Amino acid sequence: MRPWEYNIRKVVPYTPGEQPKEAGVIKLNTNENPYPPSPGVVEKKENLEQLRLYSDPTAGELVRALAGYHGLDEDQVFVGVGSDDVLAMSFLTFFNSDKPILFPDITYSFYDVWADLFRIPYETRPLDTSFELNPSDYEAGNGGVIFPNPNAPTGLAAGLDVVRDVLEHNRDVIVIIDEAYIDFGGESALTLLQDYENLLVVRTFSKSRSLAGLRIGYAMGSTRLIKALNDVKYSYNSYTMNTPSIVLGVESVKDEAYFRDTIARVVRTREWFEQELTRLGFSYPRSSANFVFATHESVPAKEIFEAAKKEKIYVRYFDKPRIDNYLRITIGTDEDMRTLVSFLGKII
């Protein structure tokens, strides 16, 4: 190595789902919403001249909309450039102990990347054979706890009793619940904010609000946690959120009817698709997300993944211990899923 190379920070980066550029593909590998954003977002006309100005560093208009929507005070809401930005900022802000942070062994694969990047010690706790989280695994001394609920990539949602159990045994550290998929099923931990000052709940506009391309994420918690996040943010980059994201994010929050209708459509398709998977010999944890995590009784997941790709159908395959025979399949439109079911019937 050259002498200066010893001073370069070395990490194994997160690998996102493939983003195919070819036309005519069925893209079921990155958990995007198959339906367009709300009409209010699509129709909003914004004066582009104001883009010569810096955006509001507080994203105040969006913070106010989210606080009103969730019945919180404005100083209980933090916004960022997608939930990944919010979560990374949370790792940097809250996980500064010499003790390891804890998260499941099968979970969002960005957690260990951030831990390595920020030099945070961590340990994983294995999900049980049914991919369920055991709260007793999080009772040991630690520097913080984080897990998604519903979990990714399994789609399973832990009940509020499990979340409360983890919080009860971790009152001296920050506990982060990553609720990227909560709108599609499960019980939100938001109802626990008043009881636990150390709880942070993180959400995104990328899934249920069909705005993955705008990159909007947010966190909700006690005023002390949100102030700490903002202090770190303003020490790192004051102008993280662009003006169009702020303006269009507010429009999305306003259209509750469209939001609920879109979620219902995805859930109906998911339930139909799960029935079809059962008919074809697949098994899966009952999903509370906008995807299904499935394995077949006789056909290897990698073989299905590769064959589907040749037919321009993209699903997600993880070559990792315990889950290397599973596929994570995003719920698309009814037409997308019928095409996939037809393909699966042929290959099986």
Image (spheres, rainbow, N blue to C red):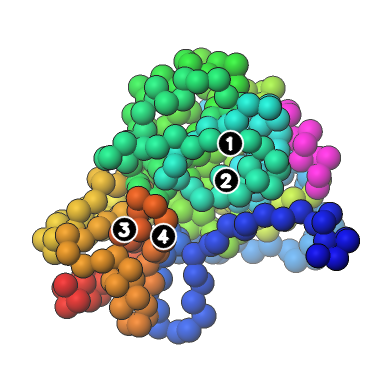
| Residue at (35% x, 53% y) in the render | 323
Kind of residue at badge 2: Asp
Q: CA distance from mark 4 to mark 3?
A: 7 Å
Query: In the rendered structure, which segment of residues is drawn in magenta?
Result: 226-237
Q: Answer with the quarter of the image where residue 295 lies.
A: bottom left
Image-based side of 188 in relation to 327, left or right: right
For marks 2 and 3 on the same chain, the one whose residue lies earlier in the sequence: 2
Label 3 near label 2: C-beta < 8 Å?
Answer: no
Q: CA distance from mark 1 to mark 2?
A: 8 Å
Q: Marks 3 and 1: which is nearer the front?
A: 1
| Residue at (58% x, 57% y) in the render | 14
Residue 216, given in percent of the width and then of the height, sits at 60, 51
Q: What residue is pinned by disc 4?
A: 318
Say which quadrant the N terminus sits in. Answer: bottom right
* Residue at the outermost front position: 1
Kind of residue at badge 1: Tyr
Label 3 near label 4: C-beta < 8 Å?
Answer: yes
In this rendered view, identify the residue nearer to me: 332 or 298: 298
Vertical placement of residue 316 versus 246, above or below: below
Kind of residue at badge 3: Tyr
Kind of residue at badge 4: Phe
Vertical placement of residue 304 versus 289, above or below: below
Label 4: how many Cα within 10 Å (few below 14, some 14–19, many 20+): some
- Asked which secondary structure carries label 3, the reply is loop
Residue 112 is labelled as: 2
Residue 122 is labelled as: 1
Residue 243 is labelled as: none
| Residue at (29% x, 47% y) in the render | 287
Q: CA distance from mark 3 to mark 1?
A: 25 Å
Q: Main secondary structure of the magenta part?
A: helix
Q: Answer with the quarter of the image where residue 131 lies.
A: top left
Q: What residue is pinned by disc 3?
A: 326
